[in-house]
Image: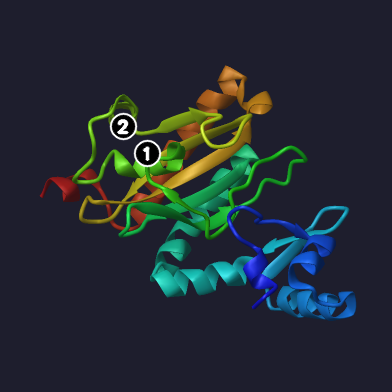
Amino acid sequence: MDVLACFDPQTPQQSVTELQKRTELSRPTLYRILATLQGKGVIRSFGNPQRFELGHEATRLAANWIGQDDFIRAAGPALRGLWEKTGETVALFVATDDGMKICIEEIRSQQPLTFTRGIGLREDLEVGASGKAILAFMEDGKTDPDLDDVRRNGVRISEGEVIDGAVAIAAPVFARDGNVKASVCLFGPEVRMADQGRRSASVELVRAASEEISHALGYFPAHAAE
């Protein structure tokens, strides 16, 4: 548990040296724990030098805890498709009862220069594209130029709003009853997203992914109008 607690929103990725400093475990003990956690899928390793982050099993456990396991399964194909088509990090966010958002799924880009927020990240809904894509369609949605733009275009694009040099593109996901349930978000560096053709294509792909997930949940405009 001490090892898992090291993976927080501020430090979603850790090296062995960093983990050892934070846990004060001996290196052999730490390696044994990491091997066990990785074998169970709770963490995953990547890169050279090797780093660690939470894995798919941590996502499943978190999803069970917040009651979103079925939702993640329904969203999986669309998220995977978006990731394969763009090569960028994609993530799924849901709103919490206390006005926050939490990342419940993330597929990290395999490109050398990338951005990741990390599963379990909690932030205010008013922060970033992923939160505003949800907030714009909530019943008590505020009047704000950013939110009005999302309502008109169905997507929110932010540049350097949360991370310097990062571009985020997010779109809302709706449940069968027409209420906003989540947002799907793509993160990429400005150096790649500056190309207008690539950016426009990414916007359309994010929009399509959000619609695919909404349809998987049973949402169609006709249902919302009933």
Here the colouring is rainbow
**Residue at image x 28%, y 32%?**
151
Q: Which quadrant would residue 111 be assigned to in this image?
A: top right
C-alpha distance separating marks 2 and 1: 6 Å
Spot the residue most to the top.
Answer: 196
Q: Are marks 2 and 1 in contact (CB under 8 Å)?
A: yes
Report whether 84 appears left or right of 122: right
Q: Earlier in the sequence, mark 2 or mark 1?
A: 1
Which mark is drawn over residue 147?
Answer: 2
Residue 67, given in percent of the width and then of the height, sits at: 38, 71
Report whether 106 appears left or right of 3: left
Disc 1 target residue: 132
Disc 1 residue type (three-letter): Lys
Residue 152, given in percent of the width and then of the height, sits at: 29, 27
**Residue at image x 38%, y 53%?**
100
> SS at mark 1?
helix
The answer to whether residue 42 is seen in the rendering is no
The answer to whether residue 217 is seen in the rendering is yes
